[in-house]
């Protein structure tokens, strides 16, 4: 018995040591290196980097612009997301599953693709407007090249995020409170204002904080819409300085990255303070509230909801696809002028684009496979562990994803600028540094659904095997992995879709030969080749749709809440 007990203790210690090592490598080490560059440049304490950053007018202007579009995008996303969550969760609208799939799709599409799609919908080169004879004269400024355009697209991009969080909270809404108010004669407006929205405050505030962090860290939309208008936010300012100065400006961009992180953390802290001012706990649980009967208003409401889908999803994608079929700038698209040459060029003839497809495929697959196998033991410790440090472990895993991606990108640059100690391996200016950043940033996307799977799993089988003398690794291999693998694989699929067309991290880490799809789309658009950018984007949108539909086919075999677009 003593030998068996020692073996179990050894396996537990090995698992703990492995998890701690992962957290240090992918979370704590890059953040520590970033802070070191700001306050200990060259290994000696100095405030010069901070001082120089604070006296720079461009920094303050970009910071103000970041706050403007961040708050504006958050407010727009909140209004749209909360309204849709109320309609879908609390009314008797039909075809809600199909509607949810369409409404959530913009969140699964890369921001730069969203920006490109909307840009091709307006402006003088819009194939759709040209076909309708409504295009403005050539040379006219695209109306989306403005702060208002950035706010509008950020709101559309992250309204589905608000919807998912608020809808999850509404599923826990106690039915008896709503029915008691209704029986007292309260109308739906009063019930909404006095019961539903107050009880949903934690979900709404949490959604606002996460959306704000996403908005201030977004690179794709401000890059496509802001750079042409000379409207810089902190992520695009970092990109321009790094592209123009190289490693010599790393201390300056490190300060800007920390500044973005501080702004994001202020938003998270404010969320905690607002949520802690009142007690929103529900003393009982019951079935979800019965949906309101819309009666004669149901058809108009449903038409309005599908009109919203046509506006935020169908029209931009139509503009994107039509642009991918034109032969040149300003050419009116007809049956005679339509061509597939743009697709042939980006797939077979353009070396960087062909290479980017393979790089993104390998990077996304590698990150998702790694995350699946790591998420299972991590989820085991977090969901079923009883150690005091588990909460800190969970926060450490969340950190790289909670902070804007540009922060992790600069931290990765600083961490691997020199060869790694002892081994002498150099991954700077290679595809491996992008893989490292993907692993650090997206690991939590696999851990979250895995933890959900553990909470919905009966632990009796695992405990029985433990009583029978099976060691930890044996239990993990024979019992836990087969049961929890579907949830972990679903998380891996989310990582694959997210990383496949990612731009924020790769825009700062790519080098010649390590281009990604997001970088190629951005490069085409910046070079004026919108038709090629649209062709690549259309391919990626089709890929995303297919992956979402494929995952939906296996939704019945997955734990509840793993796929965000499924009930």
Image: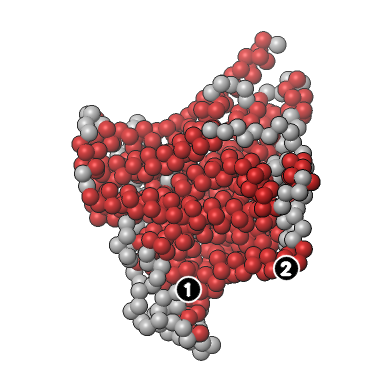
What residue appears at the point 52 percent right and 70 percent down from the top-left corner?
316
Q: Position of residue 446 (x, y in %)?
A: 58, 43
To which quarter of the image does residue 123 belong? Answer: bottom left
**Quick check: 512 left or right of 20?**
left
Q: How many marks?
A: 2
Task: Give the CA distance from mark 2 to mark 1.
Answer: 28 Å
Q: Which residue is mark 1?
A: 121
What residue appears at the point 54 percent right and 52 percent down from the top-left corner?
78
What SS does tag 1 mark?
loop
The answer to whether residue 549 of the structure is visible from this angle is yes
What residue appears at the point 56 percent right and 21 percent down from the top-left corner?
388
What residue appears at the point 68 percent right and 23 percent down from the top-left corner?
471
What SS does tag 2 mark?
helix
As drawn, the residue found furthest toward the bottom would be 336
Relative to 276, say whether 524 is above or below: below
Q: Position of residue 346 (x, y in %)?
A: 45, 70
Q: Could you tell which of marks 2 and 1 lies nearer the N-terminus?
A: 1
**Quick check: 184 left or right of 430?**
right
Mark 2 in CB contact with mark 1 (< 8 angstroms): no
Q: Position of residue 209 (x, y in %)?
A: 49, 44
**Quick check: 184 left or right of 76?**
right
Q: Which mark is residue 157?
A: none
Which callout, 2 or 1, points to the residue nearer the camera? 2
Relative to 532, say whether 36 is above or below: above
Q: Which residue is mark 2?
A: 299
To which quarter of the image does residue 514 belong? Answer: bottom left
Q: Nearer the viewer, residue 507 or 513?
A: 507
The answer to whether residue 218 of the structure is visible from this angle is no
Q: Badge 1: few (under 14), some or many (20 or more) residues near its Cα, within 10 Å?
A: many
Q: Badge 2: few (under 14), some or many (20 or more) residues near its Cα, within 10 Å?
A: few
């Amino acid at each position: 018995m003593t030998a068996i007990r020692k073996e179990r203790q050894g396996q537990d210690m090995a698992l703990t040591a492995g998890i701690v090592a992962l957290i240090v490598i992918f979370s704590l080490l890059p953040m520590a290196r970033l802070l070191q560059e700001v306050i200990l440049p060259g290994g000696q304490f100095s405030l010069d980097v901070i001082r120089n950053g604070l006296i720079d007018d461009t920094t303050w202007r970009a910071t103000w612009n970041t706050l403007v579009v961040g708050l504006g995008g958050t407010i727009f996303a909140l209004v749209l997301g909360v309204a849709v969550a109320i309609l879908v969760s609390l009314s008797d609208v039909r075809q809600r599953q199909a509607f949810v799939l369409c409404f959530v799709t913009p969140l699964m599409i890369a921001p730069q693709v969203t920006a490109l799609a909307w840009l091709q919908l307006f402006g003088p080169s819009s194939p759709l407007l040209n076909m309708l004879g409504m295009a403005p004269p050539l040379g006219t400024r695209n109306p989306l090249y403005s702060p208002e355009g950035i706010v509008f697209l950020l709101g559309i991009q992250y309204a589905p995020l608000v919807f998912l969080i608020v809808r999850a909270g509404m599923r826990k809404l106690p039915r008896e409170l709503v029915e008691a108010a209704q029986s007292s004669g309260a109308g739906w407006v009063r019930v909404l204002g006095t019961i539903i929205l107050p009880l949903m405050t934690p979900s709404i505030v949490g959604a606002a904080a996460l959306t704000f962090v996403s908005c201030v860290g977004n690179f794709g939309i401000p890059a496509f819409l802001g750079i042409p208008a000379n409207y810089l936010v902190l992520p695009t300012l970092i990109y321009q300085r790094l592209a123009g100065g190289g490693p010599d400006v790393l201390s300056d961009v490190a300060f800007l990255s920390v500044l973005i992180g501080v702004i994001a953390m202020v938003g998270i802290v404010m969320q905690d303070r607002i949520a802690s001012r009142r007690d929103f706990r529900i003393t009982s649980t019951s079935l979800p509230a019965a949906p309101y009967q819309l009666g004669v208003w149901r058809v108009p409401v449903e038409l309005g909801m599908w009109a919203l889908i046509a506006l935020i999803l169908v029209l931009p994608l139509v503009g994107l696809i039509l642009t991918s079929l034109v032969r040149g700038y300003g050419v009116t698209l007809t049956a005679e002028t339509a061509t597939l040459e743009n697709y042939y060029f980006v797939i077979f003839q353009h070396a960087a684009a062909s290479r980017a497809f393979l790089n993104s495929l390998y990077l996304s697959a590698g990150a998702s496979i790694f995350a699946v196998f790591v998420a299972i033991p991590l989820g085991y410790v977090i969901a079923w562990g009883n150690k005091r440090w588990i909460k800190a472990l969970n926060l450490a895993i969340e950190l790289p994803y909670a902070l804007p991606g540009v922060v992790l990108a600069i931290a990765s640059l600083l961490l691997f600028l020199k060869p790694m100690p002892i081994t002498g391996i150099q991954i700077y200016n290679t595809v491996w540094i992008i893989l490292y950043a993907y692993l650090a940033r997206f690991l939590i996307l696999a851990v979250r659904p895995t933890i959900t799977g553990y909470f919905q799993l009966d632990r009796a089988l695992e405990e029985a095997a433990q009583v029978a003398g099976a060691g930890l690794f044996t239990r993990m291999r024979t019992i836990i992995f087969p049961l929890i693998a579907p949830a972990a694989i679903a998380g891996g699929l989310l990582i694959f879709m997210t990383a496949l067309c990612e731009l924020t991290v790769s825009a700062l880490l790519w080098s010649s030969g390590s281009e990604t799809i997001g970088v190629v789309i951005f490069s085409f658009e910046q070079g004026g080749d919108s038709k090629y950018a649209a062709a690549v984007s259309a391919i990626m949108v089709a890929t995303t749709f297919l992956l979402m539909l494929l995952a939906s086919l296996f939704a019945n075999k997955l734990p509840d809440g793993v796929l965000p677009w499924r009930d």
